[in-house]
Amino acid sequence: MKLLVYGAGRTGSVFSTHLHEAGHDVSLLARGERLAALRRHGVQLAEENSPAVRRVPVPVVEHPAGGYDLIAVLVRTHQVDAVLESLAGLEGDVLFMLNWAAGARPLGAVIGHERVLLGFPTDAGTMDGDVVRHRAANLMTRLTPMPIGEPDGRATPRLERIVRTFRSAGINAKAEPRMDAWLKTHAAFAVPLEQAAHAAGGPEALAGDPDAVRDMIRLMRQHLAALPTPPVPRGFVALRALPEGLLVAVLRRFLRSSTAAHSGLSSASPAAMAELERMAGQMRAW
């Protein structure tokens, strides 16, 4: 497959690196200072706090042209509108792997409904300057698979081909027949979590305030109850069924973990806040 990874942040960088090292014809799209850094040093990867930095010469492009078998979009939610405009002139299926709770229709309305697939990267990491710091067990090796799926839930030949391609690169992908419900469920959980973490000053600070964690759980439960379909994965039903005190203890432990520390919950950048507001707006629509 000829692949374009649209977005050279932490996830797009790790994703394209594994595809490149597996021998696939992949290009990483970047612009501005990020493009310049990638052309100088390639993708720079380091595990968590390790001083060892690995450099991988992934091919980079600024202005893609022509056609691709697959374009994987890994950007923030509020950047999608600008991405859609540039994708309209390219050929190829488009897999949107990002926080997105608005369904496939607004995406397909711009680039063609037949081109759209949905997914979500299940990695964790942060940008340290031009270096991507990630956990040793990131989305390529962790037990939680990376879900991707057709908007209508069909098991299509192209979906099977994409899953095989990702797995050949060590990416733990799986076909998810209810991808739209998965994304909406994730938003119902993630938006209150990120709002509470930002308000507290980070996940560690939030863990130290059990009342704030309790308020966050109640908001998650309200969002899950308002979902237009049953939650996916079904394990999220536990957020509505388990005793509140138990959930407070579990989530406080998570907030103190290295997973939370490297998940982006500590970021209060303008981009992170803009994405959070866009996600909240998509949730308000349903």
Image (cartoon, grey):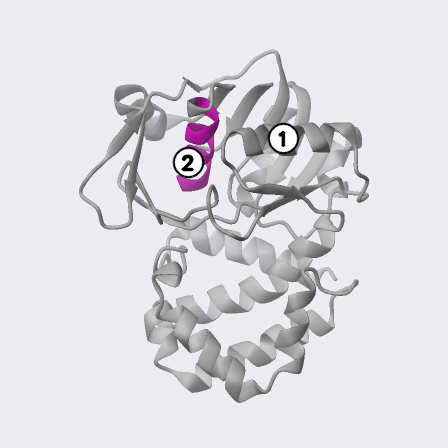
The residue shown at (45%, 86%) is 211
The residue shown at (56%, 22%) is 3
What residue span does the magenta drawing correspond to?
10-20
Q: Nearer the viewer, residue 87 or 210?
A: 210
The residue shown at (77%, 65%) is 230
The answer to whether the residues at label 1 and label 2 have Cβ atoms under 8 Å apart is no
Q: Residues within 10 Å of mark 1 (few under 14, many from 20)?
A: some
Q: Nearer the viewer, residue 93 or 62?
A: 93
Where the C terminus falls, by quadrant?
Answer: bottom right
Q: Which mark is residue 14?
A: 2
Q: Secondary structure at mark 2?
A: helix
Kind of residue sitting beneath label 1 = Arg
Q: Which mark is residue 173?
A: none
Q: Which mark is residue 164?
A: 1
Kind of residue sitting beneath label 2 = Val
Query: Residue 163: where, in percent of width, then height?
Result: 64, 34
Where the N terminus falls, by quadrant?
Answer: top right
* Tag in front: 1 or 2: 1
Q: Residues within 10 Å of mark 2 (few under 14, many from 20)?
A: many
Residue 115 occupies quadrant: top right
Q: Is residue 19 magenta?
A: yes
Query: Residue 257: where, in percent of width, then height?
Result: 36, 66
The residue shown at (50%, 20%) is 26
Height in image: 268 above or below 75?
below
**CA–CA distance in space, label 1 to label 2:** 18 Å
Along the horizontal axis of the image, is 103 left or right of 6?
Answer: right
Along the horizontal axis of the image, is 250 left or right of 66?
Answer: left
Q: Nearer the viewer, residue 208 or 84?
A: 208
Along the horizontal axis of the image, is 59 left or right of 90?
Answer: left
Query: Residue 86: where, in percent of width, then height?
Result: 59, 25
